[in-house]
Amino acid sequence: MEFKLQPGSACGSLVSRQLPQEILATNREAAQYGLRLTEPEAAMLAQTNQDAIAAQDRIEFGRSAALPLIEAFMRSSYLAPDNYAETLSELLDIFYEAKETCNDLVSDEQLIRVMFADFETTSGGDTERLRSYDLPRFYDYMRKMVSRGIPAKPARGEGAADDV
Amino acid sequence: MSELTIQLPFSAAELDEQNYTASLLEQCAAHGLLDDSRLQQIKDAFDDAFAETAAQYTRRASSTLTRAHATQLYESVLYRADLFLLCLRDPARAVEALRTMDLSALLKKGQQLLAMLCEETGRVFHDAFSHRLNVPVLAYHHVMYAVYDNFAKRYSARFNARACDESIDYPLLGRQAYAIHLDGVRYLHAYYTSLMHENRFCRHCGEEAVTVLLKQAGRQCGTPLRQLTGNIAETVLGNLLAGALLRHDAYRLALTAAELDELRRTLADDDETALTERLQTAFAPYRALLAEDKGCYEYLCRYLPRFAVQLRQRVQNGGLQNFLVVFRG
């Protein structure tokens, strides 16, 4: 057996294995909004999640951000049964791209909140507008905050010698 | 853990001490010392520890990390395992630990060792600092007054254990700082342990005598004292050893040109082995003089063979006067 130790070697695949089932479990709550994902759609979203993470050269280690993203966006007034899975897939792509662009300065929850607020208002439910117009305004805001030395609730820990 | 240790099909030299756990596991996998299910258990345990460390790093606010950050965190987990397995001082015992120990307990012990090593490094530094020389040599001043403080402020044992970003130009006795092939706090511990012995030794010689010697060394090579780049203890020990060969009083550092001529004549026919033995004999009285500081004596003794090589070269090519510090007298 070849043995290589690297981050995400096992935990990444464990997260991915369970994710389709966890995505399907969001149907219980989505039902009240008239939305539902099929098994193939859940598998497709899990795959999109994995591909989007890989495309940004990131490593997933905890409860997948796909789940809170689905839980947030199922409330959107722009999502309907015929565009639900496809829009979620695009939103996942946008989410990881934004995460990388923000240099990890925002938490998953904050970013989902910003994405949802823009999607519901200025973007008018248009994912392309969200990606290319509204989120870049948020990135500019983040950069300004950082350049002024105002921490935008960093999602990073900081160390010290006794920080064991 | 069983007291019986196995005969390993690989040698300790084949292991990478800086990536000890990973290289040990690679050897175990290659030679079938751990079965696939145990290797998977080990991987899973490291992944779990990584996931928890990553969650702490992101303050449980993110589910992903850049690969660079993830690698840094994963390496920090492996660093804990390295410390525990290295402290067993025997690859066979380390393999036995990997075979039988609960992995979370192993990582916990590694974490405790890491905390102890950080504390110990602080103690070693403070010992070195309390025996420091008040000489205005900039490179030395930097390691005494800036490097450790910066390290203590910046080092993250939990999130970036392998890092040691401090810039250290000041060399040690007989070797450059970069020749210490260790990482993280282990590097700084090794560096300041050496410096502690060197400072203690120089203090035994007397701070004033050392300062006079260094000023003379500066004059000899046309460099202001503050810009000296060599190791202070090396300069001091060189003169002390030459003095010991000439049967000077203990800790006397001054040498005259006439004494160097005498030394050259005395040593002219010695090969490296003979010269090393001669140095060991001449330095032997310091075992008693440094009886309270055995670690310091042993540290200095390790330098003797290297000094013998350099001294012989200088005796052969007539360059003793540039090698040792000469006082007009």
Image (tube, coloured by chain):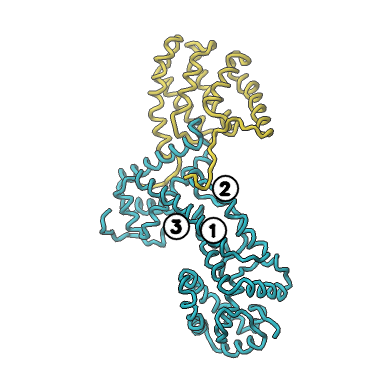
Q: CA distance from mark 3 to mark 1?
A: 27 Å
Q: Amino acid at mark 1?
A: His
B3 versus A71 height, above or below: below
- Same subunit under labels 3 and 1? yes
The percent coordinates of residue B144 (x first, y second) are 60, 59
Residue at the image point whose x is 55% and y is 76% from the top:
B307
Colour of the chain lettered A: yellow
- The residue that mark 2 highlights is B153
Residue designated by label 3? B17
Name the chain under label 2: B
Residue drawn at 59 percent across, 53 percent down: B166
Marks 3/2: CA–CA distance: 26 Å
Q: What mark, if any, has residue A107 been given in the picture?
A: none
Instruction: Give the amino acid type for the residue marked by disc 2 in the picture.
Output: Lys
Circle 3 — which element? helix
Q: Are marks 1 and 2 in contact (CB under 8 Å)?
A: no
Q: Name the residue rendered at 57%, 47% in the picture.
A: B154
On the image, numbered disc 1 is attached to which residue?
Answer: B126
Give the colour chain B carries in the figure: cyan
In the rendered image, residue B202, in percent from the top left (x then y), is placed at: 58, 71
Q: Are marks 3 and 2 in contact (CB under 8 Å)?
A: no
Q: B16 left or right of A133?
A: left
Q: Residues within 10 Å of mark 1 (few under 14, many from 20)?
A: some
Q: Where is B311 relative to A119, above or below?
A: below
Q: Secondary structure at mark 1?
A: helix
Q: Residues within 10 Å of mark 2 (few under 14, many from 20)?
A: few
